[in-house]
Amino acid sequence: MPSLFSSIIARELPAYIVAEDEHHIAFLDINPNALGHTLCVPKKEVDKLFDLSASEYQDLMMFSRSVAAALKQVVSCKRIGLTVIGLEVPHVHVHLIPLNTMEDATFKKKVALSKEEMQNLTQQISAAFKQ
């Protein structure tokens, strides 16, 4: 059975997609720790980060770096944090989280955004990514 992320990649489920290339996709987390919390996902369905080939791993990190740069242009924060946990969805994903405090990285603090706020943020990050 395809993962939730595979269904997003196939456009079977909606998502706030901020960036995409041939092998990766990035979209806003719908239960964000902070404004702009973004997931970077390889399109190839692989459960665990270290099951990616060395080149797939490097490509995912380079894609994540590009998305983080776009995110930093749009969201005011001290830095963009990166974490890979992968327990909730069995498909590799990198969390990019705008950080101002350590609490932003705990996955205990959540922010609520309206559909309009999510759409606006998506457009801004997407535009910055394409620059």
Image: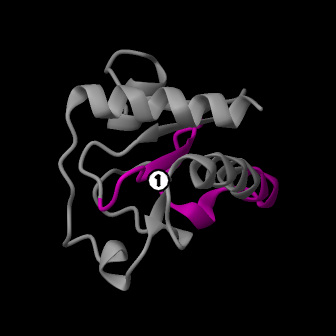
Q: Residue at 36% across / 26% down in the picture?
A: 119
* Left or right for 18, reference 113: right
Against 58, residue 4 (above or below) is above
* Left or right for 18, reference 121: right
Furthest residue toward front = 76
Q: Quadrant of the N terminus?
A: top left
Q: Residue at 42% across / 49% down in the picture?
A: 36
Horizontal and vertical percent position of residue 13: 31, 21
Horizontal and vertical percent position of residue 46: 53, 48
Quarter of the rendering containing residue 117: top left
Q: Quadrant of the C terminus?
A: top right
Q: Residue at 32% across / 21% down in the picture?
A: 14
Q: Nearer the viewer, residue 15 or 91?
A: 15
Looking at the rendering, the stretch of residues picked out in magenta corresponds to 33-59
* Left or right for 35, reference 58: left
* SS for dot 1: loop
Q: Residue at 38% across / 81% down in the picture?
A: 101
Q: How many marks?
A: 1
Q: Nearer the viewer, residue 77 or 37?
A: 77
Can residue 5 be seen in this snapshot?
Answer: yes
Is residue 45 one of those drawn in magenta?
yes
Is residue 28 one of those drawn in magenta?
no
Furthest residue toward right = 55
Horizontal and vertical percent position of residue 68: 62, 54
Can residue 1 be seen in this snapshot?
Answer: no
The local crowd at label 1, few if under 14, some if 14 to 19, many if 20 or more residues have their Cα within 10 Å, is some
Q: Nearer the viewer, residue 91 or 105?
A: 105
Q: Which residue is mark 1?
A: 47
Q: As shown in the figure, which amino acid type bears the numbered disc 1?
A: Asp
* Left or right for 59, reference 129: right
Horizontal and vertical percent position of residue 108: 19, 72
